[in-house]
Amino acid sequence: MRWQARRENFRDILEGDTCVHPGSVFDPMSARIAEDIGFEVGMFAGSVASMAVLGAPDLIVLTLTEFAAQAYRINRAGELPLLCDADHGYGNALNVARTVEELENAGVAALTIEDTELPAPFGANGKARLISIDEGAGKMRAAIAARRDSALVIAGRTSAMSIAGLDDTVLRIQAFEAAGVDAVFLTGVTSRAELDRLSNSIAIPLFLANAKGELADKEYLALRRVRIVLQGHMPIMAAMKAAHDTLKALRDGTSPDKLEGVPDGDFIKRITRGGDYQAMLDKYLSAPED
């Protein structure tokens, strides 16, 4: 199976004793760059997908089909193991099962399913809500049952720390662990005391949305079984700003040869795998010598 090696590489990280930062990617080019630089894992977030595919904010207007198609484009561009934020699984437990099927076929190495009530319901007034622990655990069981490749990592994600507090978060991640997930993804953790209690309450690996202040110590995190820590999604933001500035400069009359920040031909050739394509041109399209 084409995707097997990258899934096994991701599981090696889960079973190891170090903490890594994934490279936030949004398309084939950004994934190749992250792989060339040396990131062990790529991260494709729901918010990033919404911007990259629709040019829309993170309001759950992207469809599963659109998300899976972009994940596939990213995966086919290289060999970087890809962790996907599959939001709430695009519906109830049945939709979660379909989400796992589509993302597994798209080649992802790992995916997260969260317990937030999405899209935002009428009357929420901008305040996030959680589904019940029982419904969340049911989603996790459906995700596990839908998986065909046992190497695919499925993580339960919760925002309970910033919505319902520490005690509720402990109950949720214990329920997710009992449902059979491979890891839990936590948002809203802000202190070592919180992380210590959460880590001690389960035995499976942890992912964190960020690690600021006293949590910004990868050795400490690794000892608490934290294997993945996000660093935000700055690459797509930077790409948007670079495109804006370049287009504005051209519109304002700057000569193309005077633009700043434009990579040279060697960079473009390396990222687009120009050498590989040239080898195929030489092998299959070159006229025979006399």
Image (tube, helix red, strand yellow):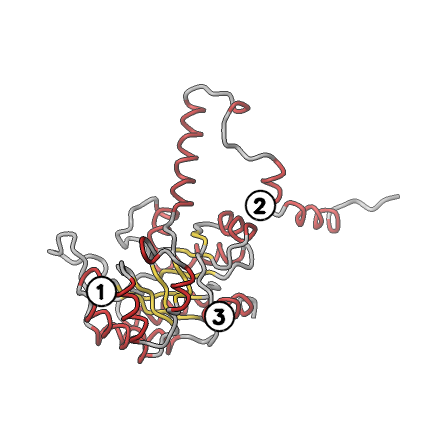
- Amino acid at circle 3: Gly
- Amino acid at circle 1: Ala
Is 280 on the left or on the right of 272, as rendered? right
Q: Which residue is mark 3?
A: 16
Answer with mark 3 or mark 2, whichever residue precedes in sequence: 3
Alpha carbon separation for disc pair 1 and 2: 40 Å
Position of 84 relative to 290 (above/below): below
Residue at the bottom extreme? 178
Callout 1 crowding tier (Cα within 10 Å): few <14, some 14–19, many ≥20: many
Task: Give the mark toward the camera: 1 or 2.
Answer: 1
Residue 251's mark?
Answer: none
Classify mark 2: helix, strand or loop: helix
Q: Which residue is mark 1?
A: 160
Residue 271's mark?
Answer: 2
Residue at the right extreme? 290
Task: Give the mark toward the camera: 3 or 2.
Answer: 3
Residue at the left extreme? 123
Q: Position of residue 163 (x, y in %)?
A: 18, 61
Callout 2 crowding tier (Cα within 10 Å): few <14, some 14–19, many ≥20: some
